[in-house]
Image (cartoon, rainbow, N blue to C red):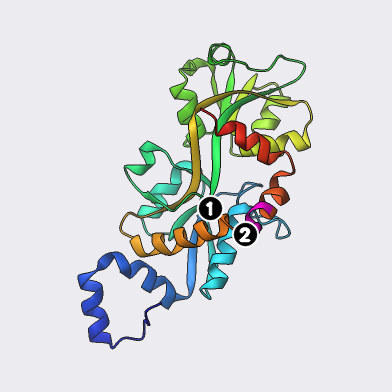
Amino acid sequence: MRSLALPLAAAAALWAAAPAAADWAEIKQRGTLRVLAVHEDLFFNLKDPQRPGFDRELLQGFAALHKLELDVVEVTGWDAMIPSLEAGKGDLIAGGYAITGERLTRIAFSSEAFPSRKVAFNRRPAPPVASLDALRALKVCTVKGTSMAQEVAAAQVPAANVVFVPSGTMPDALRAGQCEAAVLGVEHVIVQRQRDPQIQLGVFLGEPGSLAFGLRKADAALRAELSSYLDNFRRSPSWSRLVVKYLGDEAAEVLRKAREK
């Protein structure tokens, strides 16, 4: 890696000529990587240091490689993520953040951190939600400002049937009867099935997608460094161990089905 120990005048000229690289240089000089996150158990746990979350472990490895400290900036809700990033409150968005067309108009993304797809789910003894038509006839829980909410809208679930609940509470809302079905990333439903055997998978929504880290479009150097790290990590045995740690042994087969068109 090219040394950052440049004379001040030369460094200023370099940054002026290539502003996209200034993001990574600034982070290295600062010594901290500021991560915007909302608490949720699977990807970014802000409450349990013993199970910090899939994304948090990825970023801890990346930070350690570059001798950086993680500075976690808690955000009030998912709909505040992009405005917080644009306002400079953090360097990246983490926490199982889905790549969507709408988000790509405003921000950039790293390489894939985790494969994903939205899926409808409900609880026995009700029958599984086997089709989009069946989903449209039910009260459906989702979280405002998320890619789940976008998929619910794209599936043409009537607005009167949509119930917005706080992040991380959809299984509880199902059990309490606030809704009859919910839509989540399949990875989250895998985890919930381990906790509640009455939960059952239903119809997949939309196309197979990816979870990644969100970044400002100008921060090309940070994006390149992070993407290189993720690409290498996913080719290593550590990837599979981390998947099993957080999602269990059934994850590989369910994720394979989610990748099918």
Q: Residue at x 52, y 25 (%)?
A: 205
> Which amino acid does the dot numbered 1 rest on?
Ala
- Report the residue marked by disc 1: 37
Q: Position of residue 186 (x, y in %)?
A: 61, 34
- The N terminus: image quadrant: bottom left
On screen, residue 221 versus residue 38, left or right, reads left
Which of the two residues, 48 or 8, is positioned nearer the viewer here? 8
Residue at the (54%, 11%) spot, across then down:
133
Mark number displayed over residue 202: none
Q: Is residue 171 above or below residue 6?
A: above
The kind of secondary structure the magenta stretch mainly shows is: helix
Q: Is residue 85 left or right of residue 41?
A: left
Q: Which residue is mark 2?
A: 57
| Residue displayed at 27% across by 81% down | 11
Where's residue 39, x and y in %? Answer: 60, 49
Q: Secondary structure at mark 1?
A: strand
Residue at 61% x, 36% y: name it.
256
Residue span colored magenta: 236-240
Q: Depth-wise, is mark 1 or mark 2 nearer the camera?
A: 2
Task: Report whether residue 130 is seen.
Answer: yes
Q: Amino acid at mark 2?
A: Glu
